[in-house]
Amino acid sequence: MAHLLNTSFIPSSPSLRRNSIPSSSSLRTPRKPQIQAKIREIFMPALSSTMTEGKIVSWVRSEGDKLSKGESVVVVESDKADMDVETFYDGYLAAIMVEEGGVAAVGSAIALLAETEDEIVEAKSKASNLSSPSSPPATLEKTVEVAAADTVPSPPPAVKATVAASSVHPASEGGKRIVASPYAKKLAKDLKVDLSGVVGSGSMGRIVAKDVEAAAAAGSAAVSITAAEAPKPSGAKVAAIPGIELGMVVPFTTMQGAVSRNMVESLAVPTFRVGYTITTDALDTLYKKIKSKGVTMSALLAKAAALALVKHPVMNSSCRDGKSFTYNSSINIAVAVAIDGGLITPVLQDADKVDIYSLSRKWKELVDKARAKQLQPHEYSTGTFTLSNLGMFGVDRFDAILPPGTGAIMAVGASQPTVVATKDGRIGMKSQMQVNVTADHRVIYGADLASFLQTLAKIIEDPKDLTL
Amino acid sequence: MQSSISLSLSSPSITRSDRTVVDAFAANNSLTPRSLRFCGLRREVLGFKSVSSTQLVASSKRRQLNKVLASLSGNGTPTKGFDYDLVIIGAGVGGHGAALHAVEKGLKTAIIEGDVVGGTCVNRGCVPSKALLAASGRMRELQNEHHMKAFGLQVAAAAYDRQGVADHANNLASKIRSNLTNSLKALGVDILTGVGTILGPQKVKYGKVGFDESVITTKDVIIATGSVPSVPKGIEVDGKTVITSDHALKLEFVPDWIAIVGSGYIGLEFSDVYTALGSEVTFVEALDQLMPGFDPEIGKLAQRVLINPRKIDYHTSVFASKITPAKDGKPVLIELIDAKTKEPKGTLEVDAALIATGRAPFTKGLGLENINVETQRGFVPVDERMHVIDANGKLVPHLYCIGDANGKMMLAHAASAQGISVVEQVCGKDHVLNHLSIPAACFTHPEISMVGLTEPQAREKAEKEGFDVSVAKTSFKANTKALAENEGEGIAKLIYRPDNGEILGVHIFGLHAADLIHEASNAIAMGTSIQDIKFAVHAHPTLSEVLDELFKAAKFKVNNSSPVAEPVAV
């Protein structure tokens, strides 16, 4: 049996790797080598009938080693046991594509075998073009580095610096040493969180699991408003910030990595946008009146959106699997907040039910927590509808990218005095703002969105309901 | 059959490998008595049928009824000129086992105990730890939502009461202790209270400190004083934040983060308890891999199940050179140094540290100098018959040492078996205990158990002696009962001689492994070959079929010219 299982070195068809083999045929027979293919791919073998993926326990040989037929090359961990995997061909181990600890699907390439020494370089370049379907962390990092090199230098991870300095662990030697609990370390590895950028909330300031979870969630939450942040004149800002060398290649921080992944993921959702201009005179008047009571514009807008959502439940729904959608039971308005080096979306839960004063107090509390990086997961990850406001920068209109798992996000521009013609034929000055909603067209259609905006406009233009 | 695969107990080769086992254990410093097998309850229930001891000592003759009656009527009459036939110093599991067997053999027996009856196993070892593991094992199961869901069960948030769990452990220890004491009293064994000291040949004194001491004469003496947790220098044990197993078993607090120094049996079991109760654990291991002393393959799998998915991290190849208890609001500080280069390897700050680096023999105050015996690293040197050896390499007449104090195999049931072996000898029947047939178990979830040699040990022995070694494996994944329990994780591994079917070692990792090992250990003790045992019938569906399959998976050489490939379990 052993010899059948060790069919790791399946010669590649010259074009591409095969993704998988039918799982029913565990004992697949080795494919016949193609004589012209001199660089062969080493595949993750199926070591048992139930194995769908395998983990590389260790590479017995390293890149550049000469191998002869029958030699053990790699130890693979299946769902049942560790097994040595042998080569069926002589050659050189040219490139290892899945590092130790990495996981690869059965049948996917884990390394390249060159027939001669000269072909090692060629194989290596081939390896960098192919990436295994579920690469280990190490490979991922490399990919990120490559990507970073091609793009405009991004500002250094500001979070990291700020946070490390604020670490209070007595034994952490001013942030030089990271004190994290075993589980926190494990989670950080899994979630790809850089511990040097995490503030510990555990005993003596040590980093515990929930800190890592918070940091990871902050990373993904950031994604939702990236679109909102995009219009920032980042290029100019970069040049102005001291300590940034132009031309420098900066690897992604965990947060940036998460943003990058989620941005790409968001492309899988078919979105569309509908804009609306809303007159805000009445809202501004109301705001002036109750500002002294601690009410903020963010809370007012969140409240207005929540009241409109009550009448349009489909706008508060979410579609996750592409086959069904959920009418969310509560209206939780996530509001984007820029924090040092990133973004987070504190959530005003049940914004339709909570009165405006409580909502404003809650908002202030959430913002304070967000700045101190102490938001709990339920305080930033439970939003059902997102608000992003760039009005304070003078932005009059923009559009936002839909955060995965929600139905719609509303981008709010600045309210500006505008000359308008009224229905009675007069011309007057009114304050107006533009809002632009991005929605998931799988569940929310044009008419839904339009009527939601109409309702929202009515609420904002006659805001008496907001203070009820 | 028996003759063809004779275990030749006294052959030097076996003795050598025996030493290897002991050394491996000693190096890993983490053995502790782990079984209840000979603890009082069961023996008491069994009365004097003594089935297990008969098997163990492989007695060829049925005991005569009149002897049983004699022992029932009480402690025998001493040999002329002596107060006792046998005096046992230490009433742990080893001493207890020896005393019961001695009474059965008609010897007038006394047992000297300076502390509480039951010794480490019952009071500070296997017994209370099993109670903690039972509670924490259930906790772990109830918390495993995925596991429960697979059964179709819904459990609301599981929680535990620390004091309740601690009380369970304490109550169990008291109960077993009283069972043990009662069984000795019922037999009429004299329990003498105080510290026992050997004054000279066949002369022992005992007494509590500050009280009058009594001197007694006896025909034979067994030292069974056991062991205490060993604490390497540089480590300050305060009993609160820096603790040994003695303190940990009281479960006075469950720290958020505990460092466990040593990843042998004790460390591993406590990591199971603490992680189930919500602690995070950091192992500090001096050797280059966790779980030294286990078969490497079993260790690797165990690490994948017991360490990696849990809230545990580890540092290997490091010593904890200094450990300072928590005080003045500072955490427990552990300074690590490289095990080889002695270079500093950083500091750990944790809420508590458990020192599980092994156990040191407790032989102080025994008066060994009175009979010219020098301990070796604290252990009393003995020969293969547990006969004590003096500084000149000569046997000390009438003096034996069993259990942790001789360091041969630091397990409760090994001590008891050694005690029974000694009693056989003092009754005039030569007996050598085959340590390779003594099973060991680690009661994690799932459990680990083993008997005989590990694969590397077997291969080393095979090379020296010129025979072939084969390995067969079976998986719990293929066992109906294990799958019904949703506990398919685990393997059983058989190391054997393909030429004659001799079992060299069996290692099990999986559900109830500790209970499953005995089929294999009995086969080794009885000299049963795989060819014979494979015809034994196992009830279906039971976990025992894992071993059934294992024996059936073994392949034998028809003749020496056809090599047998190692079967691969899939």
Image (cartoon, helix red, strand yellow):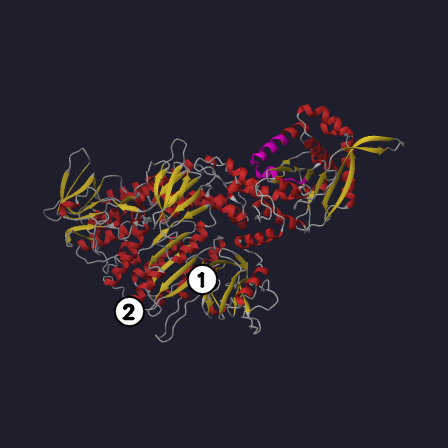
Amino acid under label 1? Val
User: Quick check: can you spot residue A245?
Assistant: yes
Q: Which residues are magenta?
A: A363-385
Is A85 in front, or is B224? A85
Q: Percent position (x, y) of residue B192? A: 20, 40
Quarter occupied by the C terminus of chain A? top right
Q: Determine whether the residue tagged by mark 1 lies in a helix, strand or loop.
A: loop
Question: From the viewer's perspective, is residue B475 above or below residue A467?
Answer: below
Residue B424 colored in magenta in the image: no
Q: Percent position (x, y) of residue B205? A: 15, 41
Residue A368 colored in magenta in the image: yes
Residue extending furthest toward the right = A425
Q: Determine whether the residue tagged by mark 2 lies in a helix, strand or loop.
A: loop
- Mark 2 and mark 1: span between their CA atoms? 42 Å
Q: Which mark is residue B4?
A: 2
Q: Is residue A425 left or right of residue A354?
A: right
Q: Is residue A175 left or right of residue B562?
A: right
Is B496 in front, or is B390? B390
User: Quick check: can you spot residue B244?
Assistant: no
Q: Residues within 10 Å of mark 1 (few under 14, many from 20)?
A: few
Callout 2 touching callout 1 (CB < 8 Å): no
**Residue visible at 41% across and 67% down in the picture:** B566
Are the residues under marks 2 and 1 on the same chain?
A: no
Is B278 in front, or is A284? A284
Q: Which mark is residue A89?
A: none
Q: Quadrant of residue B335?
A: top left
Is A336 in front, or is B438? A336
Q: Is residue B75 left or right of residue B503?
A: left
Q: Residues within 10 Å of mark 2 (few under 14, many from 20)?
A: few
Q: Percent position (x, y) of residue B321? A: 34, 43
Q: Which residue is mark 1?
A: A60
